[in-house]
Image (cartoon, rainbow, N blue to C red):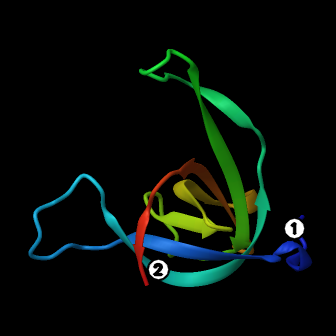
Amino acid sequence: MMNAGKLKHRVLVLSPAAQIGHVASLRPTWTTVMTIWAAVEFPSSKTSGGVNVADGTPVSETTAIFTVRYRTDILPGMALRHLSRDFVVVTADPVDGGRQWLSIKTREVKDIACQT
């Protein structure tokens, strides 16, 4: 069971911003929608199965699990920013099927442009 005292990391929650009047670009803009407290775990970096085209080396992927108080407004496709590192939300599921904690599984991404 999670202890609220472990929620000691400030995390920004980012959402893709609508670009009205602009041609869709390959690089979306993100808007900060809220700041939350979270516990953060880095299970391990693993090879994602991809290969770097330039030199043929395996591509590693950093994953992180953020645990926060239960909420319904964090969805896959959103992003979390923690210590200047950006993570895209892969899943957001209640812990133990309850409504006390939410486990957010993420993968790290580079270069998210953010509007505040």
Q: Which residue is mark 1?
A: 2
> SS class of the residue under badge 2?
strand
Q: Amino acid at mark 1?
A: Met
Q: Position of residue 8 (x, y in %)?
A: 82, 77
The residue to which callout 2 is attached is 32
Q: Residue at x 9, y 75 (%)?
A: 21
Q: In front here: 102 or 45?
A: 45
* Identity, as a three-letter code, of the amino acid under mark 2: Thr
Identify the image quadrant of the N terminus. bottom right
In three-dimensional space, the C-alpha distance between marks 2 and 1, rounded to whole angstroms, equals 26 Å
Q: Residue farthest to the front?
A: 55
Residue 97: name its quadrant: bottom right
User: In the shown orientation, is residue 89 left or right of residue 114?
Assistant: right
**Callout 1 secondary element:** loop
Q: Residue at x 60, y 52 (%)?
A: 106
Tell me where residue 116 sits by quadrant.
Answer: bottom left
